[in-house]
Amino acid sequence: MTKKKKTVGKTDADVILIGAGIMSATLGVLLKELEPNLSIEIYERLDIAAAESSDAWNNAGTGHSAFCELNYTPEKKDGTVETKKAVQIAEHFEVSKQFWAYLIEKGLISNPENFIRKIPHMSFVWGKKNVDYLKKRYDELQKCDLFSDMQYTEDADVVKDWAPLIMDGRKKNEKIAATRMDLGTDVNFGSLTRDMFNYLKEQSNVSLYFNHEIRDLKKNKDGNWIIKVKDLESGDKRKRVAKFVFIGAGGGSLPLLEKSDIPEGKGFGGFPVSGQWLKCTNEEIIAKHHAKVYGKAAVGAPPMSVPHLDTRMINGKQALLFGPYAGFSTKFLKNGSFLDLPKSIKFNNIRPMLSAGLHNLDLTKYLIEQVRQSPEDRLEALKEYLPTAELKDWELEYAGQRVQVIKKDEKKGGILEFGTEVVSAGDGSIAALLGASPGASTAVSIMLDLLDRCFTADLATPEWQSKIKEMIPTYGKALADDAELCKATRSRTSKILKIETI
């Protein structure tokens, strides 16, 4: 394995992965397939993999393919709908499916039905303005082959056939519209992540440590990274030295990036947003809904708060969730500390954080309103999607924490980002992943981008190129521009992944 800057000196591992979530699992498997002799150490502060952002209850679970998520297709000031991000996300999800199909084909993991199921993705809106928007969105997406199978209707009877519960009890004269993609999926990223780690830990030169927390990290004079680790069970502390470090610790990534002290990490801040679900407890209602129905977010709402009535498979059982309802906590992780936010404020990021706050007062107002909601308030929000809903059939379930990225901006001082951001050192020796949605669904593309940044020379070799194309046959090609390749790829991955209807 070569690096942009050659390292010398004794190391304990070629690669250290911090955090046992979907990102570290994906990068670990990619690297081990590309370079089988690589030594990898993985550290997780909790006692199980995928217990934070990748867990089924803490993750939207939607195979984010931009089929139904309206926040990926914003309406511009001139009234047109921007689809660039939606196309990119749809492309990236197809890349993820190809990688997962490779894992199944090669026997690295098994039983795809444990982590991926077929479920229609729907967008549903009401009111003339929203209906007009959805029609424009549909028309624009029809220009791309990735969305050619999308259906659109303003017919209430058709919508009732697609998702009867959202039409029961609705006013007959209400103007509504919906789109539907039968190619949609439900993905249990917690199950997938644990499957990948179960494979990794059986490989030579791979060690997985739970209940271990990274306390500090700094770059040595020889170019390697010294990692200070604490065993949370025994209290023992030790140092580990690695050539490359990936910080994939979800909300815990920002504090570790700050400790790395790399110039590229200066000026980044984080804004934590928590979430809650209403979980249906009535089996009869659960059995009547078979779709992921996404609506429009409220003004000022973060993307993770786009409301949806969501059929899920969790622990092998069908579930029905509505939400998420946003909240505010100063924790960066569900199992974090209330001091996470104040401790993250440094001299180099205080201006971007203050500027981002001033430019997002509507978000602050929205979060305050969400925190103050009563059970009856939450029920009213649910009734917009399920008019006949009753409080007795639903209970509150706490979801995960997300830390939205705040970054420097020359014009505004600081801006709040709602996507994912890979921050890497100039020499490619360390990288951190910040941010949230669409995150897990596009993990493979995000990690391929990381390889391009941090393993540039290796990635250019014929051996790595050949292996990547074995794992991802369409690597380097645009499915959005090739209808036949798109259809053939989807057909192949669906067959290998045995994508069955929930």
Image (tube, rainbow, N blue to C red):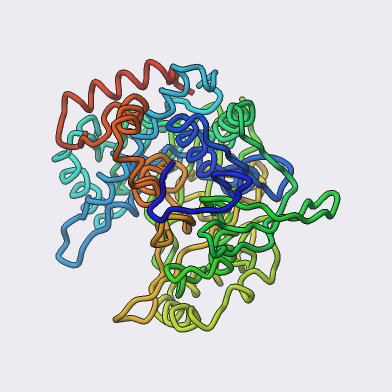
Q: Pick the residue in front: 36 or 88.
A: 36
Q: Position of residue 299 (x, y in %)?
A: 39, 66
| Image quarter (top left, top right, bottom left or bottom right) of the N terminus | top left
Q: Position of residue 229 (x, y in %)?
A: 71, 55
Residue 283 visible in image: no
**Residue 20 sits above or below residue 493 on the image:** below
Q: Position of residue 45 (x, y in %)?
A: 70, 50
**Residue 219 sits above or below residue 181 on the image:** below
Residue 21 visible in image: yes
- Which of the 4 quarters of the picture holds residue 228? bottom right
Q: Please tell me which residue is depicted at 74% across the width and 43% down the height of the picture.
A: 47
Q: Pick the residue in front: 234 or 69.
A: 234
Q: Please tell me which residue is depicted at 56% across the width and 35% down the height of the picture.
A: 193
Residue furthest to the front in view is: 9
Q: Is residue 187 left or right of residue 178?
A: right
Q: Please tell me which residue is depicted at 41% across the width and 39% down the height of the picture.
A: 444
Q: Is residue 329 left or right of residue 408?
A: right
Please tell me how many numbered marks the rendered image carries: 0
Q: Position of residue 292 (x, y in %)?
A: 43, 37
